[in-house]
Amino acid sequence: MENTKEMRSWLDDMGLDHPLVIAGPCSAETEAQVMRIANELKDTDVNYYRAGIWKPRTRPGNFEGVGALGLKWLQKVKEETGLKTATEVANRAHVELALEHDIDLLWIGARSTVSPFIVQEIADALEGTDKVVLIKNPVNPDLSLWLGAVERLHTANIKKLGVIHRGFSSYEKTKYRNIPEWQLAIDLQTRFPDLPIINDPSHITGKRDMIFDVSQTALDLNFDGLMIETHHDPDNAWSDAAQQVTPDRLVQIMTDLRIRKESDSEAEYNSKLSNLRAQIDILDHQLIDTLGKRMKVSDGIGQLKKQKNVAVLQSNRWNQILGAMILEGETKGLSEEFVLKMFKAIHQESINHQEKIIKA
């Protein structure tokens, strides 16, 4: 993609002294609900009021949105509060209705981003629009697919573009609803530093009490803004109740977040240092996660050795691993001494796991 600097002009032109904030309910439920939340958000840092009108659900039978009727409620939000409006679109008909109702920001959801056919249909319907269009990452961690969607919209002469990082699905059970895979978002920023990137901590966490920490990590990694689902009565929301916060809690989150400003050389240093430290924190968590998985495999080996009455220590196998890791470590700039110490510690932990199983 060329001329990517123009993509963030819409954001720069807003002249914000805080991260961009997109907030509002997961789903528009009733006109009264939409208006109540909007009025509670109108004098806050919120820049765009979001509400899901069409809700793609994993299985049929769940609440799938009020449809086009909700667009009239968003029009009323803009008229009465002055807040700009935002909603998700998943096909040409959605786009045409959203444009007809003068929605200011449209986003393409994770389920839509996975399909080049859907993205192209939306791009064709939006060609030349001056609306802001954001693309959520695809369900799976596929950077090429994500960027491919951005390219299709850019090719359709859509200038005001950005992406939303909402995490990635996984069969593994983790503390997240959708695993952040921060490194993938970092890679995207590295390749296209002028492409605005918004974090969606609501869908990453699936739990309102984790939203602050994920939001802070995103800001430490120089994300441009946050999309946080907000409801006046989250526990009774018609969709995604567990991950929505109240307007008061949203205000408190925005107050408590540490936001860096690059106004002088010292601020620039602190900004870069915070960014690098945030990357290290992410990698450290990944290391612990990987080591935990390795020990689960060791447990399986221990069970197998117990069944066959085989000794825990296999010297030949250990020497082969150690030699291979020393050589690979050299290619990564790691000293032999460091690799030896690290893998001896890992090996000892593995032996401890297996011995515990055999003695049980």
Image (spheres, rainbow, N blue to C red):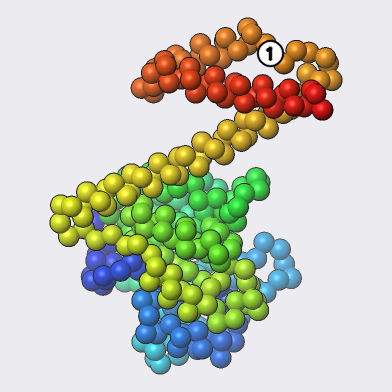
List the residue tagged with mark 1: 313
Instruction: In the displayed orientation, state which residue is furthest to the top.
Output: 316
> Residue 191's x, y, as percent?
32, 44
Instruction: In the displayed orientation, state which residue is furthest to the left.
Output: 264
Residue at 24% from the left image edge and 56% from the top image edge: 5
Front residue of this view, candidates 345 and 254:
345
In-image side of 348 versus 192 (left or right): right
Residue at 45% from the left image edge and 47% from the top image edge: 182
Relative to 1, is 164 above or below? below
Residue at 72% from the left image edge and 24% from the top image edge: 354
> Residue 180's x, y, as percent?
50, 51
> Residue 298's x, y, as percent?
68, 26
Front residue of this view, candidates 293 and 168:
293
Q: Which amino acid type corresponds to the residue marked 1 in the rendered image? A: Leu
Residue 112 can be seen, yes or no: no
Q: Secondary structure at mark 1?
A: loop
Classify 10 Å Cα crowding around label 1: few (below 14), some (14-19), many (20 and above): few
Relative to 354, is 263 above or below? below
The number of callouts visible is 1
In-image side of 67 versus 8 (left or right): right
Residue at 41% from the left image edge and 15% from the top image edge: 336
Relative to 317, is 14 above or below? below
Quadrant for residue 291, please give it: top right
Quadrant for residue 52, please give it: bottom right
> Residue 251's x, y, as percent?
42, 76
Quadrant of image for the C terminus: top right
In-image side of 50 versus 104 (left or right): right
Front residue of this view, candidates 81 and 62:
81
Relative to 252, is 205 above or below? above
Residue 237 can be seen, yes or no: yes
